[in-house]
Amino acid sequence: DSGAILGQAWYQAAIPLPIGGFKPYSREKLELTFGKMDIFGFFDQNTGAGDEGKQFLNSVLVHNPLLDAGGEVAVDGNGFQPGVIAAYVNETNKAEPWRLSLGVFGAGEKGSNYQKSLTSPLLMFQAEKQLKLFGGLTGNYRAYAWTRNAASELDGVTMGKHSGVGISVDQRVGDGVNLFARYGQLIDGELPFDKALSLGAEISGNYWGRGGDAIGIGGSWLKASKAYRNLGSAGGVGGDIDGDGNVDFTYTPSGAEKVAEIYYRLRISPQFEVTPDLQWIGRPGANAEAKNVKVFGLRANIAY
């Protein structure tokens, strides 16, 4: 069977401020956006690590792991959700603008699918500033917070309030070097990991005569939460090896899961790119007894 999916459909209005003022002279505006959208197009953006179609493949490097892999955004089965965003944009200094954004999104199995979308919504607030550093090179600095009620806890039965904070930074330090960093921390609620840090860089092929190519190197550290460790101590964390639906082993999480990834994006033509990718995962699931994992991937990207 096949079917069509409407992934995103949103409308954005940019209103010059002050309202009724002379539009050509306006350096401030109010942006109102509503519809079905990818939340990461408006929050937790990062030019160094934010596009799984061209950059890193592991989601802990693409977005804040607590929001994405941790499920805090609570999107639908295709990664989208209904929402409304109001943003104030100040371009008084056009070289270094800043923005404040507040978003309300339908979250969870029903909320993301237009069923009681505002009963327990996800609220996000973000402050962002663009700076020109290192001789005028662009950097983006973002800090944000989120909260939502009726989120599922680790036992899969209890519902509680979840909230957290995060930082996303990308900064060019050379014509072809873009550094990035992310940090996320859970303040309320239970997730397998409650702290996450990611660091890395994307380097342009200009340095070796391949302007369309790029190499990316990144690493992530995810700390096992106290609730996750306690669940493991009670025998609640385990796995099914043979696929029969029964738990074949249990373990007590400890320490932190570590992820490293490197890719090389090779441009064959303006419309065709091939990216070999290598990932290494240490202490997967925060299981000290688990073997390290190595994953090799190959991505082809055709644009037309």
Image: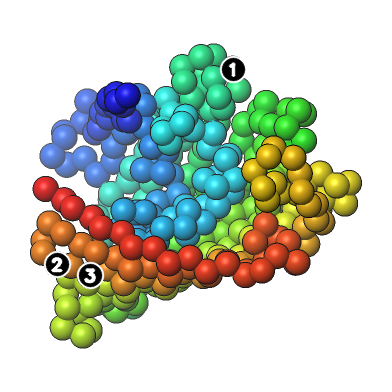
Q: Is residue 222 left or right of residue 267?
A: right
Q: Which mark is residue 266?
A: 3
Label 2 belongs to which residue?
A: 268
Q: Is residue 194 left or right of residue 82?
A: right
As measured in the structure, the alpha-carbon distance from the residue carrying label 1 to the one carrying label 3 is 46 Å
As measured in the structure, the alpha-carbon distance from the residue carrying label 2 to the one carrying label 3 is 6 Å
The residue furthest right is: 234
Q: Is residue 104 above or below residue 55?
A: above
Q: Are marks 2 and 3 in contact (CB under 8 Å)?
A: yes
Q: Amino acid at mark 2?
A: Ile
Q: Amino acid at mark 1?
A: Thr
Label 1 belongs to which residue?
A: 119
Residue at 54% across, 34% down: 74
Tag 3 secondary structure: strand
Residue at 53% across, 28% down: 107
Q: Is residue 5 left or right of residue 266?
A: right
The residue furthest bottom is: 208
Q: Amino acid at mark 3?
A: Leu
User: Could you say which is closer to the camera, residue 102 or residue 61?
Assistant: 61
